[in-house]
Image: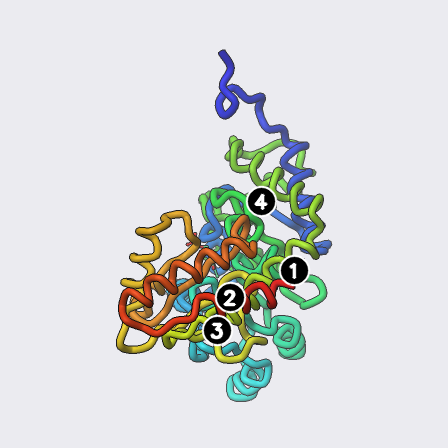
Amino acid sequence: MTHPLLDLPPLTARRFAAIEDRVARLLDTRQDVLITQGEALLPLEGAIRAAAGPGTVALNVITGPYGQTFGGWLRDAGATVHDISVPFHTAVRAEQIRAAFAEHPEIDFVSLVHAEAATGNTNPVAEIGEAVREQGALFYLDAVASVGAEPVLPDAWGVDLCVIGAQKAMGGPAGVSAISVSERAWARMAANPNAPRRSYLSLLDWKERWLDAGRTALPHAPAQLEMLALDACLERIEADGPDAVMARHRRAAEATRAGASALGGGLEPYVHDAADAAPVATTLRVPPSLAASDLVAAALAADPALPLAAGGGALAKEMIRVNHYGPDATESAVQASLAALGTALAAQGAPVDPAAARQAVQRAWR
Ligand SMILES: *Cc1c(COP(=O)(O)O)cnc(C)c1O
């Protein structure tokens, strides 16, 4: 008996290349696109270790936990690193990037996270990209949480290394990821004697053995099931229309902000300005007398399928994450999440108005 997940024909080089082309269309890029055979941490780390070295002077923008991770890799690679941190309730501004360039004119690498699912903010990449181009620096962007929820346009924005994953707003698998690489970025890697070679982390190996060889023979057995799932999710996004998929995420974020404010009980949007709030996920601030992790635990005990999580690490007490992405970018997921949080807040004695929250979500959704 054949099994639908097991007894599959091999994934061909031609099919692999066609899936890469589909990713390139989604990103509207003419850069090389590589589908990397691992979760997004693989190209995120591989790109930093390839493009940064002892001669690199990096500006690392920290707007959430991933920026901290990138700073660690950059230092580990021998780069000189200037961090700018902005509070997690806001976004970084292009003027802050320009000010950092003025202070450290030798900066030649910028790392930035586009949207942060973990903190709920999104950064103005188009404007920042202009500043980075003026500086002539290489621009590295983590777009894992933004792709599918809002436009990600590496060519238009001058992004040299743009990493995406399918597991958030694309509603796809987590086990493969992709990176678009500019000519400048390849040149920087080729000139870096410390860039990983003959290594699982090596982007240059894939360039040599796959891209430069005309994409006719795969260097290794691909993650076949994940590749098929990625293709299926790209096909679904094309069928629904990327604009419609992004609009659903935008609406889910607006509805969550409006609904949480109307719910009361001291709950408020964590990101102050709606323009800085990521369409992929909405973070909520819990009043100091309550613990976000307790409220989330109570809500999930009632319905484990809700897209709710407490903030990570030090944020677990004060932050609730509503992960309204992929299949949860719907009015019903937002309604159910806020209803469950309302019940959990009421059980703690907080004054809430679930009917007002319901109406606010409905209004924002229209
Ligand atoms: C989700 C996410 C990733 C991928 O990390 P996972 O922990 O595997 O989900 C990378 N970068 C950002 C900004 C993300 O939000």
Q: Is mark 2 within 8 Å of ligand 1?
A: no
Which quadrant of the view contains residue 94? bottom right
- Disc number lying in front (4 or 1): 1
Task: Please name the amino acid that badge 3 sits on.
Answer: Ala
Instruction: Using the numbered discs, state the Cα–Cα distance from disc 4 to disc 2 in whole angstroms.
Output: 33 Å
- Label 1's element? helix
Residue denoted by label 2: 256
Name the amino acid, label 2: Thr
SS for dot 2: helix
Q: In the image, what residue occupies the spot 52% across and 77% down?
A: 91
Residue under circle 4?
35
Disc 3 marks which residue? 262
Nearer-N-terminus badge (3/2): 2
Residue 151 percent across, percent down from the top left = 66, 62
The answer to whether marks 4 and 3 mark residues whose Cβ atoms lie closer than 8 Å is no
**Disc 4 element:** strand
| Of the image marks 4 and 1, the number of the one nearer the N terminus | 4
Q: Kindly report which numbered mark, 3 or 1, lies closer to the viewer in this rendering.
A: 3
Alpha-carbon span between mark 4 and mark 3: 43 Å
- CA–CA distance in space, label 3 to label 1: 22 Å
Residue 222 screen position, x and y as percent: 53, 34
Q: Nearer the viewer, mark 4 or mark 2?
A: 2
- Would residue 323 appear left or right of 300 to someone viewing this image? right
Q: Is residue 169 above or below residue 13?
A: below
Which residue is pictured at 44% across the width and 62% down the height?
338
Name the residue that disc number 1 marks: 247
Query: Residue 80 appears in which quarter of the rendering?
Result: bottom left
